Image (tube, rainbow, N blue to C red):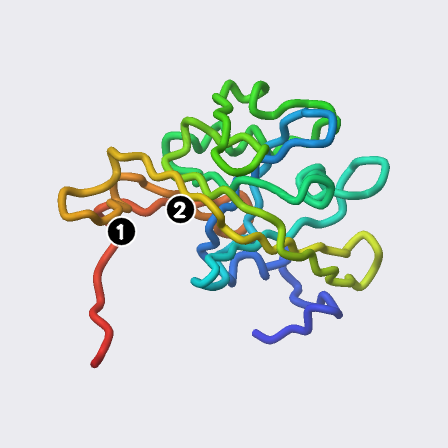
Amino acid sequence: MFYEPKKKDHGLPKNPFNSLVIPRPIGWISSVDSAGIFNLAPYSFFNGVCYNPPTVMFAGGVGSAADGSKDSVRNVLETGEFVCNMANWETREQMNQSSATVAPDCDEIAMTGLTPVASTLVKAPRIAEAPINLECRLIKAVDIPGWTPKDDYKVVFGEVVGIHIDDTVITQEGFVDVAKIMPIGRLGYNDYTRVDSDSSFTLDRPT
């Protein structure tokens, strides 16, 4: 089949685009606003961007707040900081709960029963239950205009200034044991996947 996204002429029950760029890592973004209220939300439009400096990005659409922005995006623009926490198999339910639409003054970390831990270099908290935490400082935010105002997105780029790795997921050889972490990724619709010892494999790059 072929369709033009702007014409929405795919003829399917749901837009298939989210099922075509898969699997997508989940940016589980924790932030704090200027009043000190914590926020936590998952973003599947997320990824690493480059090595030096190590940089990540996440993209947020129009939110339900009075100013039309997502709480995470607004907090990052206000404070210039955030933490990306790795969502894994053990935290899948809390990750899903933290995606709920709630009031801006709701602390999703407390709501989901997770544990906030002070970061080392930024004011935004990190999640104790997450095996990996990336402390980030804002580089820039880029507006992506939509076909209509409700389709607008803002892409946030952050430099990773501090990295926390749970010691239990580092092998004796000094490698991160991804199968032990069991990170989860976003597929289309309401579907997810996980990486474990059965789903990962190695390919040596050609010389």
What kind of residue is marked 2? Thr
In the shown orientation, is residue 149 left or right of residue 204? Answer: right
In the shown orientation, is residue 147 left or right of residue 159? Answer: right
What kind of residue is marked 1? Ser
| Disc marking residue 57 | none
Q: Report helix, strand or loop for mark 1.
A: loop
Task: Report x, y in % for residue 67.
Answer: 85, 40
Task: Report x, y in % for residue 186.
Answer: 48, 48
| Residue 46 seen anywhere in this rendered image of the structure | yes
Task: Report x, y in % for residue 200.
Answer: 26, 54
* Residue drawn at x 73%, y 41% as measured from the top left: 78
* Residue drawn at x 80%, y 35% as measured from the top left: 65
> Cβ–Cβ below 8 Å for labels 1 and 2?
yes
Q: Distance between the residues labelled 1 and 2?
A: 10 Å
Q: Tell me: residue 93, above or below residue 48.
A: above
Image quarter in which the N terminus is found: bottom right
* Residue drawn at x 85%, y 36% as measured from the top left: 66
Q: Return the residue found at the far front.
A: 121
Tag 2 residue:
193
Instruction: Choose the circle earlier in sequence order: 1 or 2.
Output: 2
Image quarter in which the C terminus is found: bottom left
How dense is the environment of label 2, judged by Cα within 10 Å: few (below 14), some, or many (20 and up)? some
| Residue 13 seen anywhere in this rendered image of the structure | no
Q: Report helix, strand or loop for mark 2.
A: strand
* Residue drawn at x 43%, y 27% as measured from the top left: 128
Q: Tell me: residue 49, above or below residue 158.
A: below
How dense is the environment of label 1, judged by Cα within 10 Å: few (below 14), some, or many (20 and up)? few
